[in-house]
Image: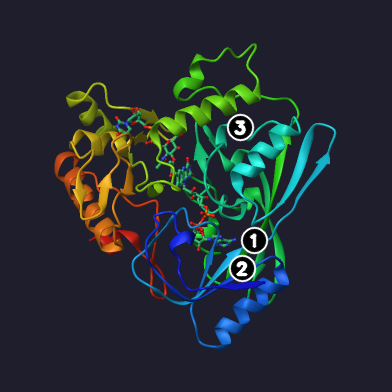
Amino acid sequence: MSISDTSLKSFNTFSLEVNAVKIITVDTVDQLVSAWSDAKLAGLPVLLLGEGSNVLFLEDFAGVVILNRIKGIAVIDEHDCWSVHVGAGENWHHLVRYTLDQQITGLENLAMIPGCVGSAPIQNIGAYGVELQSVCQYVDLLDLNTGIVKRIDSSECQFGYRESIFKHHYRDGYAIVAVGFRLNKKWNPVLTYGDLVKLDRKTVTAQQVFAAVCAMRSSKLPDPRVTGNAGSFFKNPIVEAEKARSIKESYPKAPFFEQPDGSVKLAAGWLIDQCELKGFRIGGAAVHQQQALVLINVDNATSRDIRALARHVRVQVAEKFAIWLEPEVRFISSHGEVNAVEALS
Ligand code: FAD
Ligand code: EPU
């Protein structure tokens, strides 16, 4: 366990200059429980963080930030699959590379997603046609008040698009400490999205899918080590078929993703782009030129700049398309998470 200075700049990928009362790094479940109990005894709020790649700090955090760095990757070679048990504090992209290096396939479409393994089930991370839920077997969840770790089977996680039970019922007072994966030995490449459709299913390897995903991501998404950002700022909106039809009539080329229940997922980046907001700037915050769904910190942005920009984007999209975008990024106030839609209203 170690205690850092109080700056959160390197623990949020927007690189905002914000502080906490204390920042504690934990490597074990016991340390996590003890850091939590100490903070509670001191009457301080607690925020668990992985790598801070999906948070917007609205102001300084008036409490203790606990960085989960519980490590370990254990692989069991089963008859038809590999079972992989991973500590929540492992870096996600490191896990993807590690498995591929061991000839274990299945995570390649999810390459280069920033953050920790323990954060991945929370919004059911997804990219290039694959979501975490298709490879997740279980999540080990620590009840911070009792110190008991309970195993939640994937079928109980209520996974959905950028959704899970960890954003709701298991949000407060719980920490994810490990995630279990089931990766099938019979590889079934997912080549449905973007440039992956150009690959030949008969000859393609998982390494090639990994390389193609990394190339696509690098061409559109800013590297947070260079330009502060938190990936997609908003979720893609899911609208009723009728609404989608009316947009399609005016914009035949609008990207559409039909859902099993008949609703349609639209591309928020495309909607923002249609409002001609690429490059639009408020203070030090701007809409990314290569991907309008990403808001960036171009020049010492404050959280006020990013919030003002997000508000502007939301209003412009609502005026043009009558759709109110909802943030994907989690908004953190001085005492903990707040409702992001309300914070922008
Ligand atoms: P944090 O930002 O540290 O935390 C996120 C939330 O989880 C917070 O509310 C935090 O309190 C909570 N939390 C963190 N750790 C724990 C824990 N152990 N137990 C309980 N609660 C916890 N996401 C995608 O789905 N697909 C993408 O393609 C994608 N691309 C991205 C690209 C870029 C450039 C960036 C910056 C982000 C991208 N994201 C993407 C979003 C982000 O990578 C994911 O949401 C990631 O899972 C966040 O991990 P983290 O460790 O940084 O979480
Ligand atoms: N588009 C535009 N202009 C833009 C941005 C996008 O016209 O400025 C169009 C694209 O041409 C494409 C469509 O919108 O037709 C979708 O764009 P893209 O493929 O870049 O994906 P996205 O829907 O914007 C989602 C995820 C990403 C994930 C990618 C790849 C959400 C909110 N975002 O983005 O996840 O990496 O698909 O699968 O679902 C994240 O969650 O942080 C994230 C980066």
Q: Residue at x 56, y 54 (%)?
A: 119
Q: Which numbered circle lies on residue 108?
A: 3
Q: Quadrant of residue 3?
A: bottom right
3D distance between C-alphas at marks 1 and 3? 23 Å
Please state if 65 lies on the left or on the right of 139 as rendered.
left
Q: Secondary structure at mark 3?
A: helix
Of the 4 image quadrants, the one containing the C terminus is: bottom left
Rendered location of residue 235, percent (x, y): 37, 45
Q: Residues within 10 Å of mark 3 (few under 14, many from 20)?
A: many
Of the 4 image quadrants, the one containing the N terminus is: bottom right
The kind of residue on which mark 3 rests is Glu
- Residue 37, relative to residue 259: is it above or below? below
Rendered location of residue 93, percent (x, y): 60, 42
Query: Which of label 1 and label 3 is nearer to you?
Result: 1
Which residue does the numbered mark 1 point to in the structure image? Answer: 69
Q: Which numbered circle lies on residue 25?
A: 2
- Residue 285, relative to residue 100: is it above or below? below
